[in-house]
């Protein structure tokens, strides 16, 4: 089960003396993980039954004359072999190879896949699966925190052909039923994402990607209020779309991109830049939850030192949904009402900016950062006065954050630690003297 950490100003209470006291928070997290356990599947939330199926597609730019696509439904028994070679994984696909293995727990996967069979198909599919996992190694191609490999194309390949071929992606179906009273069908979501990476030359690379989600539960049921159904029924997401420029020891990335400063697996402590889709709380995988930022990023690498400068002219904020949704974060749910979220602070005048410095010394990977931003998480302001009913409005305040991370590989285990200091964030309180329902 993935460890969870919640630092939400909307769920916090405080007993500080006086509503005008300046409030800061410090988060510290440490973990020691066996290397074999760095990646673990998520679990459904209590009170729901869910099922997920995936379909991944992969086709190389150069496979113009290959066989046609094939749609297959497969049911197989296999034994997990994380250290197995490519040939061993191929043998595990046959029932005969499966019967020869004993003494290991069996896995029964049922998958619907759209695949292209060619000489390098399985290698590409395995590479795509590894890209979706948390990275374990860093190369020059992954200076910006990405671990994708650019498809190699001949120099004579026209740009238009690069754009219409070589796409990769996945389709994912999620089903859930809420069996608490009242029982209702809560999710029937089909999620499809496509991405294409390429290059103009060795110094100029690009990526385009997008995702479309459709949840049939909001068409098949009237359980949720109309604003919730409109907000979560269907949505197109502009994912990562950027241009990479390499110039010696300097690298630049311009466009919509993920910026991940945290080191912890399964936690958001030092991941202060990322916006998140919180409409399903922490149930989706983190690569689905994270929302890219429109940013300009510059990085410098020399020997064991890495420096990074970031500017986000118009910040992207958390998606929290609408009142009446299962995971809406507003306080006093059931008794209070809520106004529309105030996002007026999203402008160039409130740009986000920060820097990060990393150093590798004797196997210790240490980094420190500073980040000024419009808080991606909303703070719920009380806008009504007694004896009127409680009315809150979610707003986003400016905050400053400083932190540090450390990672050390000890062979069989990996040690990771993070610390974050936040200044300027407000917290909800029930204290009558707090006029706006908050303390600083």
Image: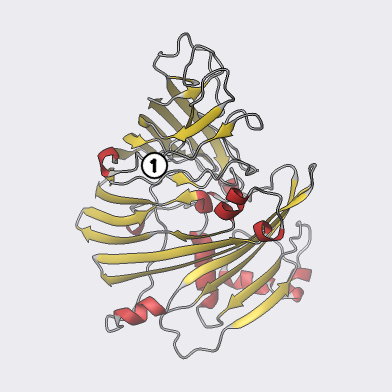
- For image coordinates 50% across by 78% down, the residue present is 120
- For image coordinates 58% across by 33% down, the residue present is 337
Quarter where residue 311 is shown: top left
Q: Which sits in the foreground, 57 or 418?
A: 57
Q: Is residue 285 above or below residue 11?
A: below
> Could you tell me which secondary element the residue under label 1 belongs to?
loop
Q: Position of residue 16 (x, y in %)?
A: 49, 12
- Judge whether residue 220 can be spotted in this image: yes
Q: Position of residue 312 (x, y in %)?
A: 30, 46
- For image coordinates 40% across by 27% down, the residue present is 422
Local packing at callout 1 (Cα closer than 10 Å; few below 14, some 14-19, many 20+) is many
Query: Among all residues in the image, which is located at the extreme left?
Result: 248
Q: Which sits in the foreground, 383 or 127?
A: 383
Please tell me how many numbered marks the rendered image carries: 1
Q: Which sits in the foreground, 177 or 149?
A: 177
Quarter where residue 76 is shown: bottom right
Q: Is residue 213 above or below residue 177?
A: below
Q: Position of residue 100 (x, y in %)?
A: 77, 69
Query: Among all residues in the image, which is located at the extreme front?
Result: 388
Q: Position of residue 303 (x, y in %)?
A: 25, 47
Q: Which residue is mark 1?
A: 273
Q: Is residue 301 above or below residue 392?
A: below
Q: Is residue 206 above or below residue 288?
A: below
Query: Among all residues in the image, which is located at the extreme top?
Result: 17
In which quadrant of the rendered image does the N terminus lie? Answer: top right
Judged left or right of residue 359, residue 187 is right
- Judge whether residue 354 can be spotted in this image: no
């Amino acid at each position: 089960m993935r460890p969870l950490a919640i630092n939400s100003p909307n769920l916090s209470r405080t007993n500080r003396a006086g509503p005008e006291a300046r409030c800061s928070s410090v988060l510290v997290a440490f973990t020691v993980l066996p290397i074999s356990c760095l990646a673990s599947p998520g679990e459904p939330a209590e009170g729901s039954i869910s099922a997920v199926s995936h379909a991944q597609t992969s086709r190389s730019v150069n496979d113009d004359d290959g066989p046609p696509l094939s749609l297959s439904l497969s049911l197989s028994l296999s034994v997990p072999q994380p250290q197995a070679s490519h040939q061993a994984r191929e043998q595990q696909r046959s029932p005969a190879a499966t019967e020869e293995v004993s003494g290991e727990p069996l896995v029964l996967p049922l998958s619907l896949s759209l695949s292209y069979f060619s000489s390098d198909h399985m290698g590409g599919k395995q590479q795509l699966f590894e890209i979706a996992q948390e990275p374990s190694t860093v190369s020059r191609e992954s200076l910006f925190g990405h671990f994708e490999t650019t498809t190699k194309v001949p120099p004579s390949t026209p740009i238009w052909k690069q754009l219409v071929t070589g796409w990769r992606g996945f389709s994912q179906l999620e089903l859930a039923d809420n069996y608490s009273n009242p029982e209702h069908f809560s999710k029937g979501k089909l999620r499809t994402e496509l991405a294409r990476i390429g290059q103009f030359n060795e110094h100029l690379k690009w990526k385009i990607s997008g995702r479309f989600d459709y949840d049939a539960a909001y068409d098949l049921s009237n359980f949720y209020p109309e604003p919730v159904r409109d907000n979560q029924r269907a949505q197109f997401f502009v994912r990562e779309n950027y241009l990479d420029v390499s110039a010696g020891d300097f690298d630049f990335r311009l466009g919509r991109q993920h910026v991940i400063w945290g080191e912890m697996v399964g936690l958001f402590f030092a991941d202060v830049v990322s916006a998140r889709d919180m409409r399903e709380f922490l149930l989706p995988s983190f690569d689905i939850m994270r929302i890219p930022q429109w940013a300009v990023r510059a990085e410098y690498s020399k020997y064991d030192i890495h420096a990074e400068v970031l500017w986000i002219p118009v910040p992207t904020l958390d998606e929290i949904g609408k009142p009446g949704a299962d995971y809406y974060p507003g306080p006093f749910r059931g008794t209070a009402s809520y106004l529309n979220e105030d996002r007026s602070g999203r402008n160039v005048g409130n740009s986000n900016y920060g820097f990060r410095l990393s150093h590798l010394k004797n196997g210790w990977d240490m980094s420190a950062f500073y980040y000024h931003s419009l808080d991606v998480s909303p703070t719920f302001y009380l806008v009504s006065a007694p004896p009127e009913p409680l009315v809150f409005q979610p707003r986003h305040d400016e905050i400053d954050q400083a932190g540090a991370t450390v990672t050390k590989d000890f062979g069989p285990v990996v040690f990771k630690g993070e610390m974050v200091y936040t200044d300027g964030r407000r917290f909800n309180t029930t204290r009558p003297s707090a006029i706006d329902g908050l303390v600083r």
